[in-house]
Image (tube, rainbow, N blue to C red):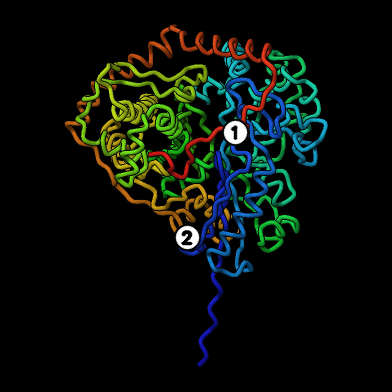
């Protein structure tokens, strides 16, 4: 008797668009096996100084990107990943993407970025605003004040504060600083949705970014009256530029177009999943879709996401959205604006050459070298405590005018002391977030770490000791891309829902780091000092950090108004990637 022919294996592709690069991952649908990957670095990285080609100079706190860099990921990383996997592209049944958020861009009605049109190419507001563009803090402050005055029902869903990183603040900044670009903007698009638009030719807003970054709650956005009170010309922002059909997570946005098939080498017509956020897709990849399982995706910044059975108002959270991570549960989000960025900044600017020489002689990176030196210290031995606000504070203060601080330095302080204090500061910042959730009735029972920083054993042990929680680690080095692949499998009909696909395709190592009682007690004392500084500068009315930033901006503006324009070099700043270059 002839045996029945086995069905050919099926594969999906997940594409993770990060801060500096895009990564494509080929995954087998049945068991989540990762077969091949490739990375493409953005040619323009993060534009912070001036527009590409020696264009307009940018003020402080700006962070822009170039949309063509995203298309290049599809052209380069996807075919390379498929080749590395050694599979027949015809066996790929779906593709899904995730993006940093809120990364947002102005486009025409057809989806063409304004920055790609000649008349707007030298206008900064025509470019993509990266998540870490913090120059709209003034607009965010006004949104928060007005919402509080009017007792807007949606405000508590965001912990009482709207971030300058989000859609409304950034759009209002465009209107008030370049009204011509604002009028030319026919669609105000999350990059997570724009890239899906490029793939399938259909613009669908994903439920995740619409809820967390677009202030969409219970099916509605802030009212026209509210928007008009911010600025009369902002009245119809939602209807004219923002509102669009909503796609649920894991659903099919459309089929791969012929053009996108030519870019990627994938079959035309295969499922393209609705877009998503890098942090939120990582939860299924880490098999952390149940209540109380918080995932901390640690890279340049950290995003904390968790599902819960109950709806609670958590002060300073980034949002709670029904079905924001998986269907049937409330998805909570919080975060820290700078983590790996801070460690990378210190190694670039705060370490003497002799340390770099010693690291090279030992065959270590500077991060590994500092980690080894710092690991030999007892808790508190360095005599320091730091605030992790070098890129502002996302949760729970939601204020990007705050800045970093190190207290306790003496002439005996060494680089490894400061390095360890900065590692600890980010752990303290996470503990503030955990306690805010606990005190609001949404307790965290497990902390699951994803991202490249999980490779640093000192950092992981510090987090376990500071938070007094067992730390699990995702079983993949490419959590967001794996999470996107899981959503691609659901969109293609290979699994019935995201939770089921996560069970089959996700992976996690439980209890990798556990808290130690003696060290945890010692950290309690240091945390008390951190919290005192946190509240003094963040809540106590001491606005020296904001005054210093204002003085800096004034000085820079004064210098630029009196100095001739010169070529200041590349328009991008190098950051620590989420893939783990830091720590």
Nearer-the-camera pick, 232 or 37:
37
Nearest to N terminus: mark 2 or mark 1: 2
* Whole-percent x, y for residue 157 in the image: 53, 26
Give the answer, above or below, for where 527 lies relative to 201: above
Which image quarter is the C terminus in?
Answer: top left
- Observer-side mark, 2 or 1, equals 1
Give the label on residue 34, or none. 2
Residue 377 lies in quadrant:
top left
Q: Which residue is mark 1?
A: 572
Give the label on residue 175, or none. none
Is residue 216 visible in the rendered image? The answer is: no
Q: In this image, 282 relative to 174: left or right?
A: left
Q: In this image, 148 relative to 32: left or right?
A: right
Label 2 with label 1: CB-CB less than 8 Å: no
* Whole-percent x, y for residue 280 in the image: 51, 41
Q: Residue at x 50, y 35 (%)?
A: 575
Residue 342 lies in quadrant:
top left
Q: In this image, 117 relative to 446: left or right?
A: right
**SS state under label 1:** strand
Could you give the CA–CA distance between mark 2 and mark 1, rounded to whole angstroms? 32 Å
* Whole-percent x, y for residue 30 in the image: 49, 64
Nearer-the-camera pick, 524 or 487:
524
Q: Farthest residue toward the right?
A: 119
Q: Farthest residue toward the top?
A: 541
Give the answer, above or below, for where 363 lies relative to 330: below
Give the answer, above or below, for where 289 lies relative to 349: below
Q: Residue at x 28, y 27 (%)?
A: 417
* Whole-percent x, y for residue 543 in the image: 47, 8
């Amino acid at each position: 008797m002839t045996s029945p022919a086995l069905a050919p294996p099926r594969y999906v592709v997940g594409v993770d668009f990060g801060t500096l690069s895009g990564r494509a991952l080929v995954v087998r649908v049945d068991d989540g096996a990762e077969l091949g990957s490739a990375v493409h670095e953005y040619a323009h990285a993060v534009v912070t100084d001036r527009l590409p080609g020696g264009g307009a100079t940018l003020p402080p706190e700006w962070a822009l990107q170039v949309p063509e860099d995203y298309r290049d990921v599809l052209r380069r990383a996807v075919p390379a990943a498929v080749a590395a996997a050694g599979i027949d592209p015809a066996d790929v049944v779906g593709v899904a993407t995730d993006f940093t958020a809120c990364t947002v861009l102005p486009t025409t009605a057809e989806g063409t970025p304004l920055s790609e049109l000649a008349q707007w190419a030298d206008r900064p507001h025509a470019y993509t605003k990266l998540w870490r563009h913090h120059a709209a803090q003034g607009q965010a402050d006004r949104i928060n004040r007005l919402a509080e005055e009017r007792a807007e029902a949606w405000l508590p869903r965001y912990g009482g504060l709207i971030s300058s990183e989000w859609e409304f603040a950034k759009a209002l900044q465009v209107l008030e600083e370049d009204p011509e670009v604002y009028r030319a903007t026919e669609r105000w698009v999350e990059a997570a949705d724009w890239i899906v638009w490029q793939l399938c030719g259909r613009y669908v807003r994903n439920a995740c970014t619409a809820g967390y970054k677009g202030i969409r709650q219970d099916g509605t956005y802030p009212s026209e009256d509210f928007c008009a009170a911010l600025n009369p010309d902002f009245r119809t922002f939602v209807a004219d530029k923002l509102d669009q059909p909503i796609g649920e997570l894991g659903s099919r946005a459309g089929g791969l177009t012929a053009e996108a098939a030519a870019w990627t080498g994938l079959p035309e017509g295969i499922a393209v999943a609705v877009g998503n956020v890098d942090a939120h897709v990582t939860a299924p990849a880490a098999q952390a879709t149940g209540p109380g399982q918080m995932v901390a995706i640690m890279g340049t910044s950290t995003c904390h996401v968790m599902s819960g059975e109950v709806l609670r108002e958590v002060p300073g959270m980034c949002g709670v959205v029904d079905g924001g991570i998986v269907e049937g549960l409330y998805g909570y989000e919080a975060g820290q604006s700078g983590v790996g960025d801070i460690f990378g900044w210190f190694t670039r600017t705060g370490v003497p050459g002799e340390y770099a020489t010693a690291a090279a002689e030992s065959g270590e990176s500077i991060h590994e070298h500092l980690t080894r030196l710092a690991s030999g210290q007892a808790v508190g031995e360095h005599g320091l405590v730091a605030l992790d606000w070098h890129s502002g504070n996302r949760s729970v203060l939601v204020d990007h005018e705050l800045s970093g601080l190190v207290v306790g330095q003496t002439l005996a302080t060494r680089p490894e002391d400061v390095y360890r204090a900065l590692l600890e500061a980010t752990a303290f910042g996470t503990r503030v977030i955990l306690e805010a959730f606990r005190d609001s009735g949404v307790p965290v029972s497990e902390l699951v770490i994803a991202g490249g920083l999980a490779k640093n054993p000192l950092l992981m042990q510090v987090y376990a000791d500071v938070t007094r929680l067992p730390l699990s680690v995702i079983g993949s080095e490419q959590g967001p891309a794996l999470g996107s692949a899981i959503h691609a499998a659901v969109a293609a009909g290979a699994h019935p829902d995201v939770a089921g696909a996560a069970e089959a395709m996700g992976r996690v190592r439980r209890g990798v780091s556990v808290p130690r009682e003696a060290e945890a007690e010692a950290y309690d004392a240091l945390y008390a000092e951190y919290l005192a500084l946190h509240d003094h500068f963040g809540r106590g009315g001491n606005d020296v950090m904001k005054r210093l930033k204002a003085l800096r901006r004034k000085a820079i503006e004064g210098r630029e108004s009196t100095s001739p324009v010169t070529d200041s070099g590349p328009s991008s700043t190098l950051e620590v990637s989420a893939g783990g270059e830091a720590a």
